[in-house]
Image (cartoon, rainbow, N blue to C red):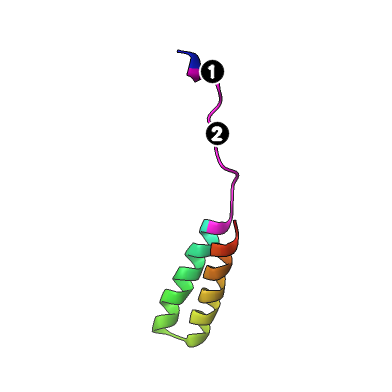
Amino acid sequence: MAGHDQPIHMPPPSLSPVTIGVGVTLISFGVLWSLILIGIGVVLLLIGLAWV
């Protein structure tokens, strides 16, 4: 089998999923507690979505 000698191609590591997860978590807590948390969460979510 000729195709098994090449290494597996993986994308480089990224902090984008972590940033998106923290942003969504802060938005969720902000719904319960504070508009400030919603604002911070939205900013982090947008940063995580734009960070490619």
Q: Identify the image quadrant of residue 12.
A: top right
| Residue most extreme to the left | 32
Q: Secondary structure at mark 2?
A: loop
Q: In whole angstroms, how far apart are the C-alphas of marks 1 and 2?
A: 12 Å
Q: Is residue 8 above or below residue 1?
A: below
Residue that numbered label 1 is attached to: 5
Name the magenta segment's main secondary structure. loop
* Amino acid type at mark 2: His
* Amino acid type at mark 1: Asp
Q: Identify the image quadrant of residue 50.
A: bottom right
Q: Is residue 47 above or below residue 14?
A: below
Q: Which residues are magenta?
A: 3-16
Residue that numbered label 2 is attached to: 9
Decide whether residue 10 is among the magenta residues: yes
Decide whether residue 4 is among the magenta residues: yes
Residue under the image location 55 percent in, 33 percent down: 9
Residue under the image location 59 percent in, 47 percent down: 13
